Image: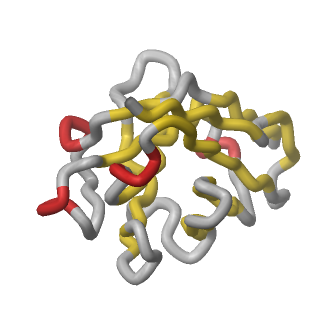
Amino acid sequence: QVQLVESGGGLVQAGGSLRLSCAASGRTFSTIAMGWFRQAPGKEREFVATVSWNGDYTRYADSVKGRFTIFRDTVKNTGYLQMNNLNPEDTSVYYCAAINRRHLFRGSIDPDDYDYWGQGTQVTVSS
């Protein structure tokens, strides 16, 4: 089992920045790739970004491309989502997730491909 704990959410003004962290514990050696998703009230969970275990492969949702950066520190077993130029449409609960299936080593945009999930952290962007 792998446990994921997000942190770094909060309230920020439009145009501001936040960095989310996702600390992994447990059988972290089985973590192949990580991803970030978000879910706003009344909406479905939405893909944000994904990164392979070594950081060589990344993929972003069009809505965040150029503003968000996903990366991970394998020594610290921590993943990050750097969010810049935030806007009110980015307001959501953000979840980190991890994959332990080797054929998905590049990550995935499909939440069903993820084996472990964190509890979520709220990000609120005011206009």
Looking at the image, which residue is at 51% across and 18% down?
41
Looking at the image, which residue is at 84% across and 35% down?
11
Residue lying farthest to the left in this orientation: 103
Residue sitting nearer the eye, 37 or 62: 37
Residue sitting nearer the eye, 100 or 59: 100
> In which image quadrant can residue 112 be found?
top left
Give coordinates of residue 84: x percent, y percent. 73, 65
> In this rendering, would 64 be left or right of 103?
right
Is residue 41 shown above or below 98?
above
Quadrant occupied by the N terminus = top left
Give coordinates of residue 42: x percent, y percent. 43, 16
> In which image quadrant can residue 33 be found?
bottom left
Is residue 6 shown above or below 83?
above
> In which image quadrant can residue 83 be found?
bottom right
Is residue 107 shown above or below 39?
below
Give coordinates of residue 64: x percent, y percent. 52, 62
